[in-house]
Amino acid sequence: VIWNQLLKSFIRNLMEEKEDDVDVVFEKLMEDSVAVICRKPLLVMAAMDSVGHRFVVELISLLQYMPDSSKVGLTEALNESGNELRRNQFGLIVVQCLKGFM
């Protein structure tokens, strides 16, 4: 519960930053590969992780506060990896949140 509150606080504080700064953070999440072998955005790898998916779910719940470019980038990155996410137990939770089922 405390971790979740800290995460929400972090994300809300991030959203209060300048729009350009927020875009830089989200670009890192969507474009940086976790490893050369994986070639997946950090955001997608987090979505399939037992702890990381909670961060992604929080991001999804706060989409309304994000700059438009970050919203579009986040949803596109997750939608492009939708099939892979659906095959993972934690990724499936993220997909369901993105679609509004949770």
Image (cartoon, helix red, strand yellow):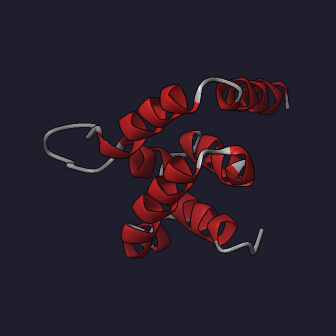
- Identify the residue shown where x is 43% and y is 64%: 76
Name the side, left or right, on which 38 lies relative to 77: left
95 lies left or right of 6: left
Image quadrant in which the C terminus is located: bottom right
The residue positioned 66% from the left and 54% from the top of the image is 60
Q: Residue at x 26, y 40 (%)?
A: 33
Q: Quadrant of residue 12?
A: top right
Q: Position of residue 56 (x, y in %)?
A: 59, 47
Q: Position of residue 23 (x, y in %)?
A: 47, 36
What is the quadrant of residue 96 in the picture?
Answer: bottom right
Q: Nearer the viewer, residue 21 or 38?
A: 21
Against 6, is 96 above or below? below
Residue 4 screen position, x and y as percent: 78, 33
On-image quarter of the N terminus: top right
For the image, the number of numbered tags is: 0
Say which of 78 and 73 sits in front: 73
- Residue at the farthest left position: 37
Q: Position of residue 71 (x, y in %)?
A: 56, 54
Taking the image as shown, residue 12 lies to the left or right of residue 96, namely right
Q: Residue at x 28, y 50 (%)?
A: 40
